[in-house]
Amino acid sequence: PVAETFRVIQGAMSEEYVRATQGVFQFELSGDDGGTWYIDLKTKGGSAGFGKPPVTADVVMSMSSADFVKMFTGKLKPIVAFMSGKLSVRSDMVLAMSLEKML
């Protein structure tokens, strides 16, 4: 489910969204399909996938892979995940909030 979610994210990217966001998000996911994943909304065209981002991440988020999938499928609100301790965010909180528009 995590890999499929990142495929959907990659397909949903637009040059306009990349221009508007200008941020690189790294996800440290635990559990099934865990590991390091990224969404690059800074480099031309944007990209998403498994591994470290091609450039330094502006925001690093840690959560379980199950909660990540719930968040990106609209079953878990990011603010609820954060407030309940399911989501940990390091660095730019304002930029982290901008990712919610993509959900």
Image (tube, rainbow, N blue to C red):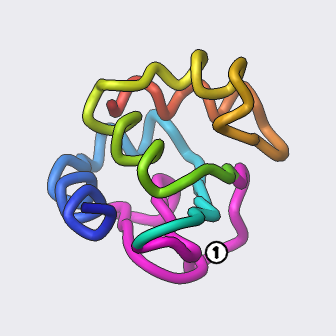
Determine the residue positioned at 55% across, 45% down: 22
Q: Is residue 98 magenta?
A: no
- Give the camera-side residue of 88 and 21: 88
Measured as percent of width and height from the top left, residue 47 is found at 36, 67
Determine the residue positioned at 52% across, 82% down: 51
Outermost right residue: 91
| Residue 61, above or below 77 | below
Q: Secondary structure at mark 1?
A: loop
- Left or right placement of residue 90 versus residue 24 in this view: right
| Residue 65, above or below 12 | below
Determine the residue positioned at 46% across, 59% down: 39
Q: Quadrant of the C terminus?
A: top left
- Left or right placement of residue 26 versus residue 3 in this view: right
- Give the camera-side residue of 98 and 89: 89
Q: Is residue 53 magenta?
A: yes
Measured as percent of width and height from the top left, residue 56 is found at 72, 70
Crowding around mark 1 (Cα neighbors within 10 Å: few <14, some 14 to 19, many 20+) is few
Residue 95, quarter of picture: top right
| Magenta stretch bounds | 33-60
Q: Which residue in the structure is indicated by mark 1?
A: 55
Measured as percent of width and height from the top left, residue 19 is found at 43, 42
Measured as percent of width and height from the top left, residue 38 is found at 51, 65
| Three-letter code for the amino acid on which mark 1 is drawn | Val
